[in-house]
Amino acid sequence: MQRYQNNIRILKEENGVRFYSSAIPADPLQEELPFEYTSRIGDRWDSIASKYLGNPSLWYVVAAANNSLNGSIFVKPGTVIIIPEM
């Protein structure tokens, strides 16, 4: 059995230099916003804002961009959420 058989390689290019990474980026880069995120069990508007916008108090920005200012802090699992540009 190979040691690295389950690794995923991603080609990255930076300043004309190519290299491979075995890590999958968890979060988008700032220049990739806005983008879509599919919610999972336990996701809340404030935790999503903290993760992608860097500030949990911006929860209302994410909720408003998704027409979800309905009083609930929890997001239904499987909901496609648009993360807006700031």
Image (cartoon, grey):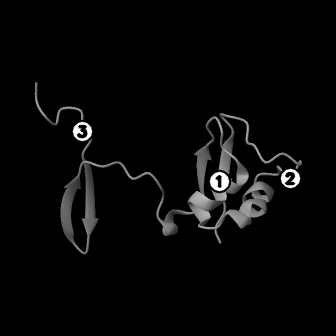
Q: Quadrant of the C terminus?
A: bottom right
Disc 1 crowd, CA 10 A, few/some/many (<14, 14-19, 20+): some
71 displayed left or right of 58:
right
Q: Quadrant of the N terminus?
A: top left
Of the image marks 2 and 1, the number of the one nearer the N terminus? 1
Of the image marks 1 and 3, the number of the one nearer the N terminus? 3
SS class, disc 3: loop
Query: Residue at the spot x=75%, y=63% of the render?
Result: 61
Residue, disc 1: 47
Q: Amino acid at mark 2?
A: Leu
Q: What percent of the width, then of the height, locates residue 47?
A: 65, 53
Q: What percent of the width, then of the height, locates residue 31?
A: 50, 69
Q: Are marks 1 and 3 in contact (CB under 8 Å)?
A: no
Distance Cα–Cα, label 1 vs label 3: 28 Å
Which quadrant holds residue 20? bottom left
SS class, disc 1: helix
Disc 2 crowd, CA 10 A, few/some/many (<14, 14-19, 20+): some
Query: Mark 1 or mark 3: which is in front?
Result: 1
Distance Cα–Cα, label 2 vs label 1: 15 Å
Residue, disc 3: 7
Query: Residue at the spot x=73%, y=36% of the render?
Result: 76
Relative to 62, say whether 44 is above or below.
above
78 displayed left or right of 28:
right
Q: Amino acid at mark 3?
A: Asn
Q: Amino acid at mark 1?
A: Ser
Q: What percent of the width, then of the height, locates residue 70?
A: 89, 48
Q: What percent of the width, then of the height, locates residue 57?
A: 73, 66
Residue, disc 2: 69
Of the image marks 3 and 2, the number of the one nearer the N terminus? 3
Query: Residue at the spot x=72%, y=66% of the render?
Result: 58
| Image mark for residue 22 | none
Asked whether 31 or 62 is in front, the reply is: 62
